[in-house]
Amino acid sequence: MDLEPIYSAEQIVVPPDLADILKAYTKEVVRRQPEDLLEFSAIYFANLANVSGGPADSVVPPALSELRQVYEMVKSTGLVQLDEFVSLCTNSGIASTTLDAMFRLGDFTGEMVDPKEPLVLLLTMTDSSFLGVVNALFEVFGEQGTLDTPEFLTLFGFMASKDSSLDPTFIDRLNQSLQQTGLDRITINDFTELPMVKEFAG
C-alpha cells in the first residue's frame, strides 16, 4: 500500500478512538507489568478485535491470578447463582464488560451455573495459542501443576466446545489416549507428549 508523504500538520488525521484505545492499553501494561510485552500486546489487541461491544478499555484479558482467586472461592461448590459468580469475578478485579464478552461467547440462560465453565471461557482470553490456553487450565484449576484426568477432560471440553479448529471427535480421541496412559492425574507435559496433541499443535 502506497502512502503519500506528510508535508504539513493539516494532513495528519488521527482516528477518533485512538487516544482511548492507547490509554486503555497503556493502563493495562502499567497495571500488569507483563514480562513479554509483545506477547501481552498481541493477546490484548486480539481479544479487543475479536470481542465486539463495549468501550475499548473494557475488553481486557483477565489475569490468571484473578481466575485462580475466583476458583478458590467456588471449587468446593457445584452450581452457583449466576449473579453471585459475576460478583465474585468483579470483586477479584475482572472487568464487568469482560464478563459480558464471555457471556456472549457462552450460553448461560439459567439462574445457576457450573462456575468452571465460565472460568474456562474467561481463561481462553488469556493466551492466543492452543497450548498456552491448555497450560493455563493447569495453572488455574490444578494442584501443583496436575489435574485429575476426568476433571481435565471436563475442563478441556468446555474449552473445545468454543474452538472451531478442533474436530468434533477430538475429545473422544483424547479420552481414549489418556485412558491408554493409565494416569489418574496428568500434567501439561503429559498432555503435550500425546501423539495426537503433537500432530494437532504442529
Image (cartoon, rainbow, N blue to C red):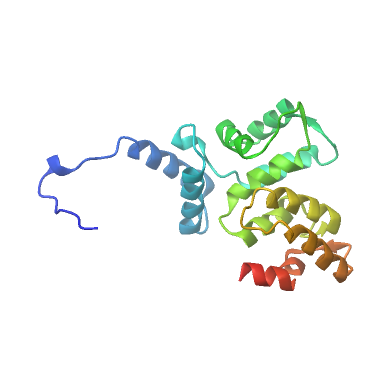
User: Can residue 161 be seen from the camera position used here?
Assistant: yes
- Residue 87 picture location, percent across and down: 68, 28
Q: Going 81% across and 68% down the picture, which residue do you hit?
A: 177
Q: Going 71% across and 29% down the picture, which residue do you hit?
A: 109
- Residue 145 picture location, percent across and down: 76, 60
Is 140 above or below relative to 202?
above
Is 200 above or below relative to 62?
below
Q: Judge from the rendering whether residue 110 lies leftward or rightward of residue 59; answer left or right.
A: right
Quick one: 143 or 48, which is closer to the camera? 48
- Residue 142 picture location, percent across and down: 78, 54
User: Can residue 193 be seen from the camera position used here?
Assistant: no
Is 45 above or below relative to 176?
above
Quick one: 200 or 26, which is closer to the camera? 200
Q: Give the quadrant of the N terminus.
A: bottom left
Give the quadrant of residue 75. Answer: top right
Q: Judge from the rendering whether residue 35 lies leftward or rightward of residue 184; answer left or right.
A: left
Q: Give the quadrant of the C terminus.
A: bottom right
Label tally:
0
Looking at the image, which residue sits at the far left?
7
Quick one: 38 or 97, which is closer to the camera? 97
Q: Going 75% across and 42% down the picture, which residue do you hit?
A: 116
Give the quadrant of residue 147. Answer: bottom right
- Residue 9 picture location, percent across and down: 14, 42
Q: Going 47% across and 54% down the picture, which residue do you hit?
A: 42
